[in-house]
Amino acid sequence: MALSTIQNNSFADTAVHGFRNIVVNGGLIVSQRGDYTSATSYSGETYYLDRWKMWQASVSGTVQQTTVTINGVTKKAMKIVATSSATGFIGTRQKIELQNIPVGVNLVASCWVRSNNAYTRFRYNDFGGSDANSPVFTNDGNWEKVSFSIDSSSTTVNPSIGLITYDTGMVSVTSGDYIEFTDFQLEISSGSPTPFEHRPYGDELARCQRYFIKSVNSGSTSYPSSGGYSRGMYLFPVQMRASPTGSYTDLGTGGSQGGTTVNKDGFWITYESLGASQAGTFDWTMDAEL
Amino acid sequence: MMDEMNITSAQYVRHIHTQQIHQIKIILDGQEMSVPLDPANRHYAEILRQVEEGTLTIAEAV
């Protein structure tokens, strides 16, 4: 029902406010690094869909951005599938900046998940100074809404939260085992999770670009000086978390890359040995992930 | 569950104008990357960790 009048209880602590999901890209809608709508082999500790870092040990797997329907609602999701069998684990997690974690309160993580591995569960690292697993989910292949309470009272480093096939150590994973999830939320709560906070794509993209951004079309310098030098300068649409690692791929339209400088706000790149009507062109990526 | 990066080479880079060391050029998983000397950058932190561990040496800038 639309809210036509601001009421006192709209301001109450118990009201469901916006900006409450600490996780970025919890709806799996942003995928700047590439098109992963087909199953893609993944490496451990590597990013594919924005902000989600893959977990993997001893088992090969694929990652995919899927489209699913839950209770009649169509939404994006992430699916991780084991493609070999071993004692190990598959999963994914999101590392979170400590400054975004309210220390001294209880948090609750929640998501929709389906899996066929008996050990699939939440796992966090470095919340409250420790690592822990949630109880295992039902893991019968059907969608279920799951949640897990977290005490962040003594969190002192960047923590992480995610989903994994894990117990007190590695577990049996069989080729074809999978974890698929969506609507991942982490919020301040000492009780039940609130409904997933849907954010517009542009807002979610900007949050992701604090950690990673790449050129959509190629970067370019202007035409050169008489000495054959030219410089391309770029400002990032949002300030990045840290000075990012840059990757610059020359596209062979003339000249050669001379030097680069980067900080949280942008970068410049110098081309040299350019012909009179040549411009240096290049693709670039910037990575300030945790 | 530690972060492990496959860095196969590393070399300091001088700033084109100041000539001060300001980046490390690395090959990570076969791709060339320019890593700023920012302790908050995860690649720089990993370079320092591997150097401390004795598994990586950073070549001098040219």
Image: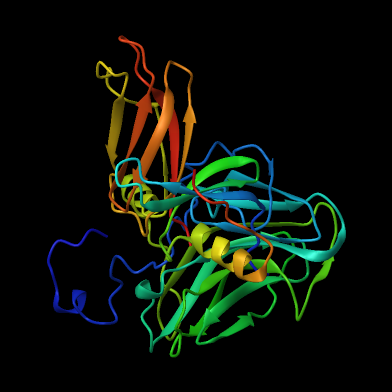
Residue at point 62% right, 82% down? A132
Q: How many numbered discs?
A: 0
Q: Position of residue A48 (x, y in %)?
A: 57, 48
Q: Is residue A3 visible?
A: yes
Q: Position of residue A224 (x, y in %)?
A: 28, 19
- Does residue A279 appear left or right of residue A135 in this picture? left
Given residues A7 and B31, the one toward you in this image is: B31
Quarter where residue B30 is shown:
top right
Q: Quadrant of the N terminus of chain B?
A: bottom right
Residue at point 30% right, 10% down? A276
Q: Is residue A183 visible?
A: no
Considering only vertical position in the picture, is A278 above or below A117? above
Residue at point 30% right, 65% down? A19
- Does residue A227 appear left or right of residue B58 in this picture? left
- Does residue A282 appear left or right of residue A222 in this picture? right
Q: Position of residue A152 (x, y in %)?
A: 45, 85
Considering only vertical position in the picture, is A195 above or below A80? below
Given residues A5 and A200, the one toward you in this image is: A200
Given residues A163 and A113, the one toward you in this image is: A163
Q: Position of residue A187 (x, y in %)?
A: 41, 74
